Image (cartoon, helix red, strand yellow):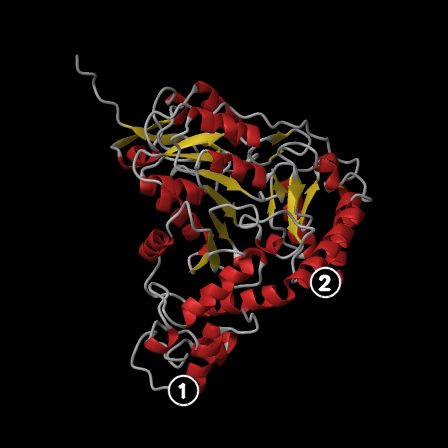
């Protein structure tokens, strides 16, 4: 296929150049009805292609023209049989994957450190999650992916599972042996769904981990906007036909997608696909070189550590994406949160994320030697300021065992609930989520039985000021639980 073509973007430009008189939404009509300051800042070109699904521009919900051509080009670029565009982020692509294979009461094997969109999909579909604990890294205080052995144990115990979901790569760039996991699941005739939100570049360079489509996975939700150059909220769902039904996938993603689809986001997917298909190898090579330079320099800075190939060799650390630069700051006597705030306040520098012991910096196709050197300068200054001044905290990465799932998350989410004091909630069935950082794994999910161990763990983290997310009461004084009914004898 000719990847120089951009069927949708070209059609949008032609339409704007023809300058038709518009009596349809959006009401700003090429920006003439927009706020003047916003119009001046955004620019007339962008506003001229903020359009709707009129005939010349095709319809994402039932594409037969330029969008269909564009998605076929994307499928070719990603080595997929089909590619579906999402203008509502990778979350919608992930929800689509799960709803395409799971119905009420059916099982899906998932890592415990899943994105919240996976739990949303489980609630929407009524599926029953079978959780696998990810491998924990006691040196860094982070979690990796699930291992082949853990997937085998889950499949042996639950051969009726409708799918296995794998995160590849993790937020920190770590991969297990995806091909091995895919082959194992397929030996049970179980499809594999991949959360590939942080792995768009791995399709385009042999020095990066194997992609989901290369490994033979059945579906992969891939964030073009995170690392592939498209605009925020634009993603793709790549599909390999056989164990999954592309027609059903189209129906479900259409159900979940707004009818007011953004043509600006669709155009950015079209053009980013072109850029990656033609220049992706060169762009990835440059990002890898910059990241490896940064990694080598960081490891020369006092009390900082950035893992590289030295982390490989375990079942959960089969490969890694070097463009994810994880910087371990514990030996400076500060937390990752403190490092993030210091870099923001002192150097006007924003990192991707921080946890108790690390900060994560992404080196992408948009970086240059200059941006990397600015990061290194900031890190050297930070080391000089904090070296030998703070008390190095003991590494703590223990979390409670996965709680007993008493109800499906869907049943718990829609059940009658009441609010009770959190410290008195042991034995009750929770109806909301509680996440604690670090290490970022959900501690309690709807339908699980709260244990005293869960309560103690969460309270300890709240008292030392670590972020707790999920519950309606952000102070975690109260929690929403299922109303208990009197037993009938």
- Residue at left offset 33%, top offset 31%: 408
Badge 2, how many Cα within 10 Å: few under 14, some, many 20+? few
> Would residue 205 appear left or right of 447 to someone viewing this image?
right
Is there any visible trace of residue 328 in the rendered image? yes
Where is 145 relative to 298, above or below?
above
Badge 1, how many Cα within 10 Å: few under 14, some, many 20+? few
> Is label 1 in a helix, a strand or a loop?
loop
Which quadrant of the figure has residue 455? top left
Where is 466 relative to 31, above or below?
above
> Would residue 1 appear left or right of 339 to someone viewing this image?
left
Question: Quadrant of the image for the N terminus?
Answer: bottom right
Pinpoint residue 92: horizontal percent, then vertical percent. 41, 52
Question: Quadrant of the image for the C terminus?
Answer: top left
> Would residue 208 appear left or right of 438 to someone viewing this image?
right
> Is label 2 in a helix, a strand or a loop?
loop
Is there any visible trace of residue 444 in the rendered image? no
- Residue at left offset 48%, top offset 38%: 186
Question: Residue 368 bears which disc, if any?
Answer: 2
Pinpoint residue 263: horizontal percent, then vertical percent. 42, 70
Residue to which mark 1 is pinned = 19
Which residue is most to the top?
A: 489
Please state which of residues 350 and 488 is positioned toward the viewer in this rendering: 488
- Residue at left offset 52%, top offset 61%: 76
Where is 157 relative to 68, above or below?
above
């Amino acid at each position: 296929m000719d990847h120089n073509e951009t069927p949708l973007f070209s059609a949008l430009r032609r339409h704007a150049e023809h300058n038709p008189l518009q009596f349809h939404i959006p009401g700003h009509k090429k920006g003439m009805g927009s706020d003047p300051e916003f119009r001046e800042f955004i620019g007339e070109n962008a506003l001229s292609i903020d359009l709707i699904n009129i005939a010349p521009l095709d319809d994402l919900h039932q594409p037969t023209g330029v969008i269909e051509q564009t998605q076929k080009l994307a499928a070719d670029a990603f080595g997929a049989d089909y590619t579906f565009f999402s203008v509502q982020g990778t979350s919608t692509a992930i929800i689509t994957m799960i709803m395409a294979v799971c119905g009420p009461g059916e099982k899906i094997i998932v890592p415990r450190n899943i994105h919240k969109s996976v739990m949303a999909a489980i609630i929407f579909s009524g599926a029953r999650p079978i959780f696998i604990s990810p491998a924990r890294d006691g040196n860094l205080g982070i979690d990796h992916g699930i291992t082949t052995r853990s997937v085998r144990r889950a499949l042996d115990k639950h051969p009726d599972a409708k799918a296995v979901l794998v995160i590849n790569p993790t937020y920190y760039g770590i991969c297990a042996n995806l091909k091995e996991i895919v082959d194992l699941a397929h030996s049970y005739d179980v499809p594999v769904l991949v959360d590939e939100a942080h792995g768009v570049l791995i399709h385009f360079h042999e020095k990066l981990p194997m992609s989901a489509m290369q490994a033979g996975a059945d579906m992969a939700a891939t964030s073009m906007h995170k690392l592939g150059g498209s605009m925020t909220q634009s993603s793709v769902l790549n599909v390999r036909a056989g164990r999954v039904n592309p027609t059903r996938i189209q129906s479900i993603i259409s159900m979940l997608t707004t009818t007011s689809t953004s043509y600006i986001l669709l155009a950015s997917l079209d053009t980013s696909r072109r850029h990656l298909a033609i220049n992706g190898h060169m762009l990835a090579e440059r990002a890898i070189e910059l990241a490896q330079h940064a990694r080598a320099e960081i490891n020369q800075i006092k009390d900082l550590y950035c893992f590289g190939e030295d982390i490989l060799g375990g079942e959960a650390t089969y490969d890694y994406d070097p463009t994810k630069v994880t910087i371990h700051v514990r030996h400076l006597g500060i937390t990752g949160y403190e490092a993030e705030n210091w870099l923001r306040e002192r150097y006007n520098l924003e990192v991707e994320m921080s946890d108790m012991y690390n900060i994560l910096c992404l080196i992408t196709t948009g970086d240059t030697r200059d941006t990397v050197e600015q990061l290194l300068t900031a890190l050297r200054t930070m080391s000089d300021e904090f070296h030998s001044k703070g008390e190095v905290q003991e590494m703590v990465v223990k979390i409670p065992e996965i709680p007993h799932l008493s109800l499906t998350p869907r049943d718990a989410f829609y059940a009658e609930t009441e609010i009770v004091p959190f410290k008195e909630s042991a034995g009750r069935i929770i109806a909301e989520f509680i996440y604690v950082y670090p290490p970022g794994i959900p501690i309690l999910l709807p339908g699980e039985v709260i244990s005293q161990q869960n309560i103690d763990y969460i309270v300890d983290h709240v008292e030392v000021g670590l972020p707790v997310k999920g519950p309606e009461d952000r102070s975690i004084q109260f929690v929403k639980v299922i109303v208990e009914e009197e037993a009938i004898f």
